[in-house]
Amino acid sequence: MVQRGFYNQCTDLAGLDAKMADAEKTGQPVVAYLGFDATASSLHVGSLLQIMILRHLQKSGHKPVVLVGGGTTKIGDPSGKDESRKMLSEDDIQANIDGISQVFRKFLQFGDGPTDAILVNNDDWLSGLQYLQFLRDYGRYFTINRMLSFDSVRLRLEREQPLTFLEFNYQILQAYDFVELHRRIGVQLQIGGSDQWGNIVNGIELGRRMDQAELFGLTAPLITKADGTKMGKTASGAVWLNEDLLSPYDYWQFWRNCDDADVAKFLKIFTELPLEEVERLSSLPGKEINNAKEVLADEATTLLHGADKLPEIKATAASLFGGGGLSDEGYVPPP
């Protein structure tokens, strides 16, 4: 994971490594979860890094849990935001859950087996909480001093942007999610982006204080492109994962038209090619690097949309760009 660029920081890397080694010996998988709030009808390509971590964990014999935030979406995660998220109706949230859930089955194997992935919705336990009882049982484990120290809150306040009491409670509910998942299905590891570090640590500390649970947190780095912009966003819009928002051809073009400096990084993270092959491809000189970009586009598109889409994509690229598939204007999403 470190070599491929998935690792940012871990609450106890040596302990997690030992836990996974024990799991390999005993045949008892480590159960790891990754959560997404239902703020849009599709995830974008920037979410793929964390999904790929779950995929690698499953292929290594561990059990992925995908959490959709039907409950936490009603509040809105303030991490990395200068203003409150738009309040969504119950119907909008459910429609978004239906939309984002499509992509997980393309990268993970779901079922009833010991390492099969499962999908859970935190609305199942959050919506039934009684406010006073929840404050008595859990609120005493959180201090305002500590909550103010985490980036999701501190940076917002430093920018003198309003932070509502509703959003301030988000980190408590995400911490509770971790504890609830540990109790329900034995989750031991939470995965998230680097901006989720504080929320993850809160959950680990809550589990230790309440249940003496041994829990772990692992964050992935924020992936940026060579031009410094966030992965998944372009000047023209988001690179969506759902086919109804972005065609397989336009998705392929996004990867085919990446910057030369991004080829090695993207091959490591967004394909499953051996690292030796990644090294060979990313070292191709001059215009030959375009061959590596085409391999990247083929591999990434196959993972999301299937290899059967490639012949049509290649035919379209050949008709438009003489076989190279490279637009002079770079990636342009459909209108």
Image (tube, rainbow, N blue to C red):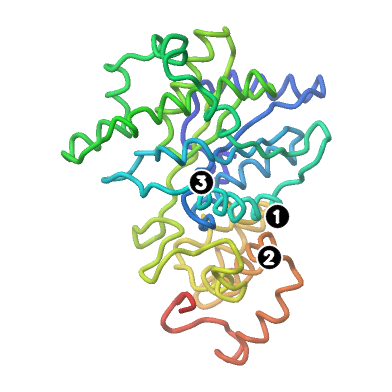
Instruction: Please provide percent x and percent y for residue 291.
Output: 60, 74
Q: Does label 2 or label 3 sit earlier along the sequence?
A: 3
Residue 90 tag number:
3
For the point 42% across and 31% down, the residue is 197
Q: Establish if 335 lies above or below 21.
A: below
Q: Secondary structure at mark 2?
A: helix
229 relative to 204 in the view: left or right: left
Residue 106 tag number:
1
Instruction: Please provide percent x and percent y for residue 155.
Output: 25, 36
Q: CA distance from mark 1 to mark 2?
A: 8 Å
Q: CA distance from mark 3 to mark 1?
A: 26 Å
148 relative to 319 in the view: left or right: left
- The three-letter code of the residue at mark 1 reads Lys
* Residue occupied by mark 2: 305
- The three-letter code of the residue at mark 2 reads His
- The three-letter code of the residue at mark 3 reads Glu
Q: Badge 3, how many Cα within 10 Å: few under 14, some, many 20+?
A: few
Tag 1 and tag 2, C-beta contact below 8 Å: yes
Q: Secondary structure at mark 1?
A: helix
Which of the two discs, 3 and 1, sits closer to the camera?
3
Residue 233: name its quadrant.
bottom left
Q: Count the labels in the image.
A: 3
Between residue 10 and residue 193, name the one nearer to us.
193
